[in-house]
């Protein structure tokens, strides 16, 4: 249970405030895609323009740290922000989110951006780190009722134990089961 204290995630309200604080098209695309797909900072840097198929609504993701990648479905709002960003791009680099000099955006820059936008969104300082987006989508999917195996696959965990830690934060199925069972006449009520 000690991992619960170390996992920081954004509430739905905090995430909405964060996304609202971002007006730059590139940055909006970065943060929405990173959140929706549970991407690490280095994984955002690895994305290439060719990894995005807007017509099919799919994105190919290579994961770091021995995680599982693959091709994933994108939602309409992701497609919209990516389309807006790709139209605006002036750089012919193969990287989807390049720095000014055409190299992949760096962790350092993403750390700077989450700090800047996190401050504007009035996020607590301990939630102003890029990895909080990965923790947030895992938690939000479970809150929405997703199966633990779906979450494991979606965020690329090879080992289910890395995903199970999120059920210690929120577990909708456990809560529903508890309500049902404790309403039973077979459980003693004073």
Image: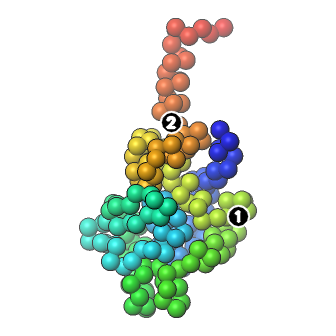
In the rendered structure, the answer to whether residue 118 lies left or right of residue 68 reads right
Few, some or many residues within 10 Å of mark 2 (<14, 14–19, 20+): some
Q: Is residue 17 left or right of residue 125?
A: left
Q: Position of residue 167 (x, y in %)?
A: 54, 40
Q: Is residue 175 above or below residue 48?
A: above
Identify the image quadrant of residue 75. bottom left
The residue lying at 45 percent from left, 59 percent from top is: 66
Q: Residue at x 67, y 71 (%)?
A: 115
Q: Observer-nearest residue: 51 or 2?
A: 2
The numbered mark at residue 172 is 2
Q: Position of residue 108 (x, y in %)?
A: 62, 76
Q: Residue at x 51, y 43 (%)?
A: 161
Disc 1 target residue:
122
Q: Quadrant of the N terminus?
A: top right
Callout 1 environment at 10 Å: few (<14), some (14 to 19), or many (20+)?
some
Q: Secondary structure at mark 2?
A: helix
Marks counted in the figure total 2
For the question of whether residue 144 can be seen, the reply is no
Q: Check whether the beta carbons of the residues at disc 2 and disc 1 lie within 8 A of each other.
A: no
Q: Residue furthest front?
A: 66
Q: Which is nearer the N-term, disc 2 or disc 1?
A: 1
- 2 or 1: mark nearer the eye: 2
Quarter of the figure that contains the C terminus: top right
Disc marking residue 16: none
């Amino acid at each position: 249970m000690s991992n619960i204290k170390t996992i920081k995630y954004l509430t739905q309200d905090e995430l909405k405030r964060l996304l609202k604080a971002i007006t730059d098209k590139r940055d909006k695309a970065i943060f929405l895609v990173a959140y929706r797909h549970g991407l690490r900072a280095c994984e955002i840097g690895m994305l290439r323009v060719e990894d995005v198929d807007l017509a099919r609504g799919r994105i190919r993701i290579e994961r770091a740290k021995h995680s599982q990648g693959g091709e994933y479905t994108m939602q309409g709002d992701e497609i919209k922000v990516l389309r807006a960003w790709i139209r605006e791009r002036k750089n012919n680099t193969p990287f989807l989110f390049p720095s000014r000099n055409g190299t992949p955006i760096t962790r350092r820059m993403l750390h700077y951006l989450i700090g800047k936008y996190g401050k504007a969104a009035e996020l607590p300082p301990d939630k102003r780190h890029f990895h909080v987006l990965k923790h947030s989508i895992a938690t939000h999917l479970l809150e929405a009722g997703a199966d633990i195996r779906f979450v494991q696959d979606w965020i690329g965990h090879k080992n289910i134990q890395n995903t199970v830690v999120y059920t210690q934060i929120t577990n909708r199925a456990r809560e529903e089961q508890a309500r049902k069972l404790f309403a039973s006449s077979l459980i003693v009520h004073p």
